[in-house]
Image: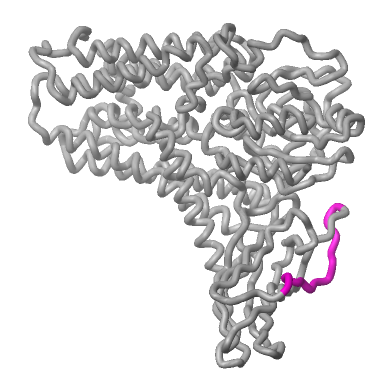
Amino acid sequence: MKRFAILFLMLTLAAAVPALAQSIKWTAAVEPAGDGIYELVLTGKVADGYYTHPLSDPYTSAEIELEGVETVGEPEDVYTPADYKGEVVVKGTYILKQKFRSPDGSVKGSVTFQSCTGDLCGMPEDWDFEAGGGGAAASVTDAAPADTDGSLWALIIEAILWGLASLLTPCVFPMVPMTVSFFLKGSENKARGRFRAAMYGLFIVLLYTVPISIIIGLTWALGGATVTSDIFNWLATHWLPNLLFFAIFMVFAASFFGAFEITLPSKWTNNADKNSDKAGLGGVFFLALTLVLVSFSCTGPIVGSVLIKSTQGEFWAPMITMLAFSVTFALPFTLFALFPSLLKGLPKSGGWLNSVKVTLGFIEVALGLKFLSTADQTYHWHLLDREVYLAIWIVVFALLGFYLLGKLRFKHDSPVEHISVLRLTLAITVFSFVVYMVPGMWGAPLKALSGYLPPIETQDFVLGSYTGPAAQAEAPAADGPTLKIAHGLMAYDNIDDALEASKETGKPVFVDITGLGCVNCREMEARVWSDPKVLSLLRDRFIIVALYNDDKAKLPESKWVTAKNGKVLKGVGRVNAYIAQERFGVSSQPNYALLDSDGELLAPVRGYNLSIDGFVDFLNQAL
């Protein structure tokens, strides 16, 4: 489990931060300056609609690195100042100069830069160059503008990485055993099994790309993505779809345990596929639709960034990006769908296929709880707090361990006369996992599971020195922050009050754009915020405001907000989501912003990124 989590973190590191297409086209040239000194001149053409930060900006990412030569003096930049929200930025032509000493004037190296549009800034990018030689000036060109093939390929690669990473998220991974079990039935005919598996992958791709393409078209026509964001937020956090998904997982689990066989009505299957008798293309489409709907809880960042691009001048790029994402996302599921037909070709040894189904049933019960937990968190039901969730998981996996040892049998199981090495290995793994979870009942952080479990703030009893809300003895001041968030930190629930506190204390404001049911938010809190350096900065140097975008609590009428489209927003989550979209240009969680006491951004908005040092650097930009 821990290795899966580490792989997931590595894959998502580059994909989680909102990406902007490379939007500066560079050329490099070398000019003689006398006495063996030459001057490197880097000329950047900033695409329309984008800007970058000059060297004088303390938050700039601009940097020149030269290889094998001695630099002379400090780098200089030449540009015509432009304004963005009172900040000096660079638009149009941007020239960077660096003198160096070289025998023949040849030089190679790289320039680091960062492009921004609106309040969104991409990750710092590097462009390698090699210029000069023989004392004559030379130039090279690379780094395509935002609408060329080079940047589009970067977007495609990012989407592919995100598609792979999505497989290991708590929203998507539960569909793997469901897929395998679904295609176990009717896989005797290998040709038919391959056809159904291929159609399953095609349905997944179409269900992602076609609706998104329609949405982008409507967004272009209507000029905004707020309604679309509301739809995705509803799918990810509303009690109805989450309870429906939970029920579906429990029904499948019961079927895996042998309680009944899941079959579609003959009328449906006959209409969908006249050549099938039980689960034709209608059933395959339903499973693909379930997968796509379930995955919105964890694939929100990529969908959200695609929608943002569609409102910032992009049209084809978001569609192509979503196509690359969906193909990558669908391919492993297509292979999983093909896997049962391969199983059927293997020799049967007792009832081992049924054992596979029962094992998947236990896993479905455990992972299906995530959807019930999401509804529980966003609606404040307090039915499935952390210790209750953990207790269920401990019991479920303990029963799975006993089943693997042959101590627990279902009606379709064959007697286990001896334990194979494989079953013993699996049993040891499962029981080790159970032992790992037990300390969590007393407040152990269980960082490897932080994305699956409810936040530790919901736990009633925490043993030891943990500084979370359960250990807080003092009630918050009436005129101070009222929200208890991760690690015992206190936060305001609205930006206006936080800005007032900032003016009084002189501290900058840390805006936590988060969600009660946000998986990646819990990962950030458990893995990054828990670091002593980060926690100390947040506690002592910042005024914190937490904007929960999925909180279903209602606001008093005095705090209702009227959106640009005239719609009155009455819920906490709806208002916070609108603020995040309009003020910070983001529609996914987590995202983090730093404000001064006047509400101006002190640094580009930062998204999901598990680099502790990077987060410390981000916070220090406001200090």
Image spot of residue 58 (x, y percent)? 77, 55
Residue 34 in the image, given as x and y percentages of width and height: 70, 90
Looking at the figure, which quarter contains the N terminus?
A: top left
Location of the C terminus (image quadrant): top right
**Is residue 487 rendered to the left or right of residue 426?**
right
> Furthest-right residue in view?
504
On screen, residue 434 versus residue 239, left or right, reads: left
Q: In terms of secondary structure, what is the magenta stretch mainly? A: strand
Look at the image and say whether residue 376 sits in the magenta stretch.
Answer: no
Q: Residue at x 48, y 10 (%)?
A: 441
Is residue 349 placed above or below 260 in the rendered structure? Answer: below
Tell me the quarter of the picture where residue 338 sits.
Answer: top left
Residue 469 falls left or right of residue 271 = right
Q: Quadrant of residue 547?
A: top right
* Magenta-highlighted residues: 73-85
The residue depicted at 17 percent of the width and 26 percent of the height is 422
The residue depicted at 76 percent of the width and 29 percent of the height is 540
Foreground of the two, 237 or 191: 237
- The relative height of residue 496 versus residue 613 in the rendered view (above or below) is above
